[in-house]
Image (cartoon, rainbow, N blue to C red):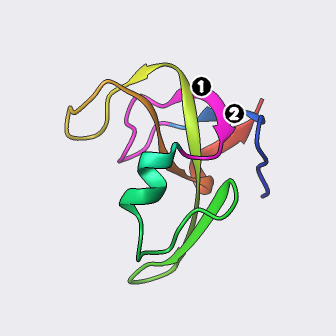
Amino acid sequence: MKFKDGDRIKIKPHLWWPNGGVGVVSLPPEFVKEALDGEVAFTSTQRTIAGKERVITSVWVDFDEPVMDCSGDGPYIGGEVSIEYLEHM
C-alpha cells in the first residue's frame, strides 16, 4: 500500500505503538534525517529497510495527539510506523 505526504491515517495498535493513534503522513523532520545519516534514509515519505527476516517499509507520521511508545517513552508528536499497521482514513 502506498502512502503520500498529507494522507490521513489510523495506526492499528501493535508492539511499537500499543495504543495506536491517528495522524498525517509527512516527511520526517530534519533532525531525524540527520540522525539517520549513513543508514537507509528517508528520501520520500516512505523508507524501506532490510530486516532480519523480511523487508520493512515505514512512513513518518505526525500524530494528532501525542503518543506513548511500547517502552512507556514519550509522549511523541511524531514517529516512524511500519505501513503494515496503517490504514487510510
Residue 43 in the image, given as x and y percentages of width and height: 65, 65
Q: Main secondary structure of the magenta part?
A: loop
Q: Quadrant of the N terminus?
A: bottom right
Q: Which residues are magenta?
A: 13-28
Which residue occupies the extreme top position in the image? 65
Residue 33 position (above or below residue 27): below
**In terms of depth relative to the viewer, which is nearer, 12 or 27?**
27
Residue 54 in the image, given as x and y percentages of width and height: 50, 80
> How far, Cα to Cα, is label 1 from label 2?
6 Å
Quarter residue 7 falls in: top right
On the image, numbered disc 1 is attached to which residue? 22
Tell me which amino acid carries mark 2: Ile
Marks 1/2 in contact by CB < 8 Å: the verdict is yes
Tell me which amino acid carries mark 1: Val
Residue 63 position (above or below residue 5): above
What's the mark number on residue 9?
2
Position of 54 compared to 68: left or right?
right
Residue 85 in the image, given as x and y percentages of width and height: 57, 48
Numbered disc 1: secondary structure: strand
Residue 85 position (above or below residue 7): below
